[in-house]
Image (cartoon, rainbow, N blue to C red):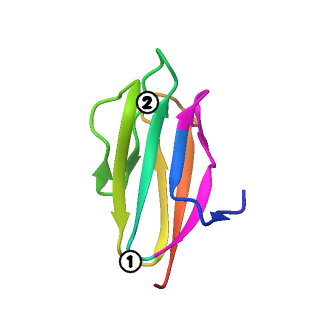
């Protein structure tokens, strides 16, 4: 899917990330919201992670460098997303 620009909040719900791909400028903090009720999720990228799977709450990570950052939920196969970071 093409990345959605102007979005800094991603929902972890219904065993998917919505939107699955976003585009942000460098220096942006992205927040993931765990909204799947009784189903726990986490967010794990290369060198960063949200910690133990959780059912509610949020996790935030700041992306300082341009690049493409894929991430996944380690609890659910196929639950993937990506953050595309552009020059500031």
**Residue identifier under label 2:** 41
Q: Give percent across and percent down for residue 48.
A: 30, 53
Q: Is residue 21 left or right of residue 27?
A: right
Disc 1 to disc 2: CB gap under 8 Å: no
Indicate the quadrant containing the N terminus: top left, top right, bottom left or bottom right: bottom right
Q: Secondary structure at mark 1?
A: loop
The tag earlier along the polypeptide, 1 or 2, is 2
Q: Residue at x 46, y 84 (%)?
A: 88
Total of numbered circles in the picture?
2
Q: Give percent across and percent down for residue 17.
A: 58, 41
Q: In the figure, 5 relative to 52: above or below?
A: below
Q: Residue furthest top?
A: 38
The Cα–Cα distance between marks 1 and 2, rounded to whole angstroms, is 26 Å
Q: In the figure, 43 relative to 65: above or below?
A: above
Q: Residue at x 31, y 42 (%)?
A: 50
Q: Is residue 79 left or right of residue 56?
A: right
- Is residue 13 in the magenta section? yes
Q: Give percent across and percent down for residue 60.
A: 35, 51
Q: Secondary structure at mark 2?
A: loop
Q: Give percent across and percent down for residue 2.
A: 72, 62
Q: Residue at x 38, y 77 (%)?
A: 65
Q: Residues within 10 Å of mark 1 (few under 14, many from 20)?
A: some
Q: Residue at x 43, y 30 (%)?
A: 41
Q: In the figure, 7 relative to 73: above or below?
A: below
Q: Main secondary structure of the magenta part?
A: strand
Please give the label number shown on residue 65: 1
Q: Residues within 10 Å of mark 2 (few under 14, many from 20)?
A: many
Q: Is residue 69 left or right of residue 60?
A: right
Residue span colored magenta = 12-25
- Is residue 80 in the magenta section? no
């Amino acid at each position: 899917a093409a990345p959605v620009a102007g979005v800094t909040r991603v929902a972890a719900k219904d065993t998917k990330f919505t939107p699955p791909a976003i585009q942000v400028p460098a220096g942006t903090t992205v927040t993931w919201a765990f909204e799947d009720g009784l189903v726990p999720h986490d967010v794990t990228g290369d060198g960063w992670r949200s910690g133990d799977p959780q059912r509610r709450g949020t996790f935030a990570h700041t992306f300082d460098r341009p690049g493409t950052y894929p991430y996944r939920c380690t609890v659910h196969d196929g639950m993937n997303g990506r953050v595309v970071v552009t020059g500031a």
